[in-house]
Each structure stands twice: as structure tokens, then as C-alpha cells.
């Protein structure tokens, strides 16, 4: 049975280990600083950790409250699913769905009427997961950047 709990400073090490699995190219210290910053934004951010029946952390979800324009949304503020990850051993057990439900409950508790998310255009597994969780694709785009001399 999977149990979902709110991430805290006491669980930050487990949460950061899961963040590192989702974003393996990121600096571990940076991931930890970001996690702590999310905890410090209690009114505008939330993170949840999923635990399996042994108590091991097997997944996480984190969300923020965005007041800027969010693609595909018509209200503001919007809950934004910033990251969701489940270790392979915890998949296909409804863990992502439980984590997303915790984020949805958090957002609803703030009076928010929409939850948004994004993923890389080539990440088909994430796109399937979003669809399975009830998200509707809003748009696709390719972003550009040019350095100015």
C-alpha cells in the first residue's frame, strides 16, 4: 500500500535523492537548495513523497502556484505540477495518480481551479502519464534563445 505524505525538512534527503533520479544532470546541491526553497514557500508551493509498504520513499510530486500566464489555462493563479517521479519499483501501482491527487487537493485548498504541467516534446512516457492522469494537451511549441553580444 502506498502512503503519501507532505515533504518536510526531515524528509528532504530522500526527496532530493528522488529529484536527482528525475533530473540526473542537475547539481545535487542545487537540487537540495531548490527543495528547501520550495519548503520555505509554504503558501505557494507544496511537495509530497510517496512511501511503499516498507516505508521507503519511492516517488515525489512538487507543485507551485503560478500567477503568470500558463499555456492552455484561462484562470489565475494556476497550480503547476513542477515535477513528478516514481522509481521503477513503485510504478504501475497507482503511485503517480496518488501523488497527483495530493497536488490537486493542495491546489483546490487554495481555491485554484486549474492544474497545469509540461514535459519535453520528446518525452513520450511523460506525455502518456499526463494523459492517464487526466491532463489534456494544451499546445506544443519549440522554444528558441539567441545570445546577444
Image (cartoon, rainbow, N blue to C red):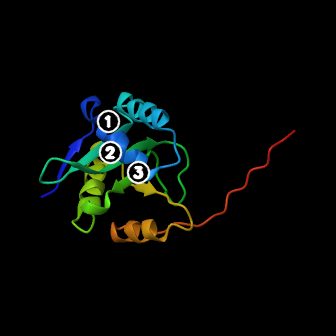
Residue 60 spot, x, y in % from top left: 31, 49
Label 3 vs 1, first from the N-terminus: 1
Q: Are marks 2 and 1 in contact (CB under 8 Å)?
A: no
The crowd level at tag 2 (other Cα within 10 Å; few <14, some 14-19, many 20+) is: few
Q: Which residue is mark 3?
A: 21
The crowd level at tag 3 (other Cα within 10 Å; few <14, some 14-19, many 20+) is: some
Q: Which residue is mark 1?
A: 13
> Front-most of 125 and 103?
125
Label 2 vs 1, first from the N-terminus: 1
> Please, is residue 116 above or below residue 29 in the view?
below
User: How far is disc 2 from disc 1 in space, using C-alphas?
Assistant: 31 Å
Question: Which residue is drawn at the image coordinates 74% and 50% (left, top)?
Answer: 145
> Front-most of 38 and 17?
17
Q: Nearer the viewer, mark 2 or mark 3?
A: 3
Q: Which residue is mark 2?
A: 111
User: How far is disc 3 from disc 1 in space, using C-alphas?
Assistant: 13 Å
Label 2 vs 3, first from the N-terminus: 3
Question: Which residue is drawn at the image coordinates 55% and 49% (left, top)?
Answer: 69
Q: Is residue 81 visible?
A: no
Residue 123 spot, x, y in % from top left: 50, 66
Left or right of residue 142: residue 139: left
User: How far is disc 2 from disc 3 in space, using C-alphas?
Assistant: 32 Å
> Front-most of 63 and 90?
90
Question: Which residue is drawn at the image coordinates 44% and 56% (left, top)?
Answer: 116
Q: What count of labels does the image hold? A: 3
Amino acid at each position: 500500500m502506498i502512503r503519501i505524505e507532505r515533504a518536510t525538512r526531515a524528509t528532504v534527503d530522500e526527496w532530493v535523492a528522488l529529484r536527482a533520479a528525475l533530473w540526473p544532470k542537475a547539481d545535487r546541491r542545487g537540487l537540495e537548495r531548490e527543495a528547501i526553497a520550495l519548503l520555505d514557500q509554504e503558501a505557494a508551493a507544496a511537495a509530497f513523497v510517496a512511501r511503499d509498504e516498507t516505508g521507503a520513499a519511492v516517488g515525489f510530486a512538487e507543485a507551485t502556484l503560478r500567477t503568470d500566464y500558463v499555456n492552455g489555462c484561462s484562470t489565475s493563479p494556476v497550480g503547476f505540477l513542477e515535477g513528478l517521479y516514481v522509481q521503477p519499483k513503485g510504478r504501475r501501482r497507482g503511485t503517480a495518480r496518488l501523488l497527483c491527487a495530493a497536488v490537486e487537493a493542495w491546489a483546490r485548498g487554495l481555491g485554484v481551479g486549474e492544474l497545469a504541467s509540461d514535459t519535453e516534446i520528446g518525452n513520450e512516457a511523460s506525455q502518456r502519464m499526463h494523459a492517464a492522469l487526466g491532463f489534456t494537451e494544451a499546445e506544443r511549441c519549440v522554444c528558441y534563445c539567441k545570445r546577444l553580444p
